[in-house]
Image (cartoon, rainbow, N blue to C red):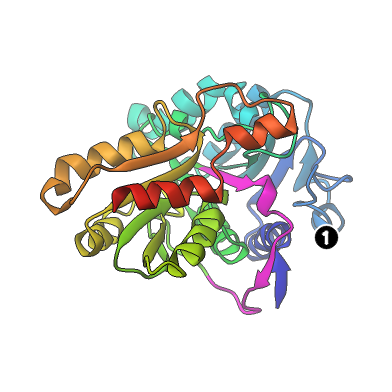
Amino acid sequence: MKTTYVQAVNAALKEEMERDNNVVVFGEDVAQFGGIFGATRGLLDQFGSDRVKNTPVSEDSIVGVGIGAALGGLRPCIELMYSDFMLVAFNEVFQTAAKFRYLHGPQYKVPIVMRAAAGSAFGAGAEHSNCVESIFMHSPGLTIISPSTAYDAKGLLKSAIRSDNPVLFFEHKQLYQIKEEIPDEEYLIPIGKADVKKSGKDVTVIAVGLMVKRALEAAEKLAAEGIDVEVIDPRTVVPFDKDTAFDSIRKTHRVVIVEESNKTGGLGAEWAAMIQEELYDELDGPIVRVAALDVPLPYNVGLELTSIPDTQRIIDAVKSTL
């Protein structure tokens, strides 16, 4: 069935709420309005106000209440609207949710999913357009998921809701309305398993979120020039599937890492260091990173587009490894 990314998220929430009465949804405007992007549309009508609730505009409170609900036996899937707003609740996410089981013992579970729309969105500005995965990657205890397709979003969100650990679930705004075929029957995607979106033999491109789509566009154009690119989508940022990435690098011996967050201290910095430390002898050249410029994302759309990696920058990066 042809389904948009946001419809896939909605279907995952609905299926998990039908399966388990402990699954609850709350956040800003998620009830009657159905969420700013429509991801929770229809849930209030089906499941009622005991399980689908609006909250005040207070991300710190939303996460704090969610952690308490998780510790009390529920499985909250909360919406924080924009990923930038997770930083408003930074202490609750980074310290409390991530570390509670480490600090208080294995008898505790914190099965909370924190959903948020991430990434650039044609003029949303520097406070509504960030990809913050790398910031939270520094805190042990968090699972971080960033799907690039409707199929992956549905299967991974269902797995996230069933996890006993806190999960940050990032959905790129520019992917919400992209349609693709997904199965009608139920399916799950395991957390921590990457996907090879395109096989190739010359260069490995590891890309995240919207950048997977752009990496595939670059791979298609490069194929016309005889360059065969393999595109790896980690899907789960933490835990990172080293096996799939390393198997690809052992085949191609060249790596390009593409992300939308700032280059300094980004995902690519961590993964490049990991590859350098553990797979140095397999490399035929330097690891190349493609990322956003180290600037607050401009409100001006033209400048925003200049700041974010595009297909040509990925093509140039791949050619530089050859």
User: Relative to residue 238, is residue 83 drawn left or right?
Assistant: right
**Does 111 sit above or below residue 5?**
above
Q: How many marks?
A: 1
Which image quadrant is residue 98 in? top left
Choose between 236 and 142: the one closer to the eye.
236
At 33% from the left and 42% from the top, the residue drawn is 288
**Does 56 sit above or below residue 108?**
above
Amino acid at dot 1: Gln
According to the picture, the residue beneath numbered tag 1 turns out to be 46
User: Relative to residue 276, is residue 20 drawn left or right?
Assistant: right
User: Relative to residue 133, is residue 75 drawn left or right?
Assistant: right
At 83% from the left and 45% from the top, the residue drawn is 31
Judging from the image, what secondary structure is the residue with disc 1 in? helix
At 74% from the left and 38% from the top, the residue drawn is 122
**Does 166 sit above or below residue 217?**
above
Q: Residues within 10 Å of mark 1 (few under 14, many from 20)?
A: few
Q: Position of residue 173 (x, y in %)?
A: 68, 46
Q: What span is in magenta?
A: 168-187
Q: Is residue 86 magenta?
A: no
User: Relative to residue 240, is residue 88 drawn left or right?
Assistant: right
Q: Position of residue 285 (x, y in %)?
A: 21, 46
Q: Quadrant of the C terminus?
A: bottom left
Choose between 248 and 228: the one closer to the eye.
228
Choose between 61 and 127: the one closer to the eye.
127
Q: Position of residue 152 (x, y in %)?
A: 54, 62
At 38% from the left and 60% from the top, the residue drawn is 193
Q: Quadrant of the N terminus?
A: bottom right
Q: Position of residue 239 (x, y in %)?
A: 36, 47
Q: Residue furthest front?
A: 225
Please say whether residue 101 is visible from this viewpoint.
yes
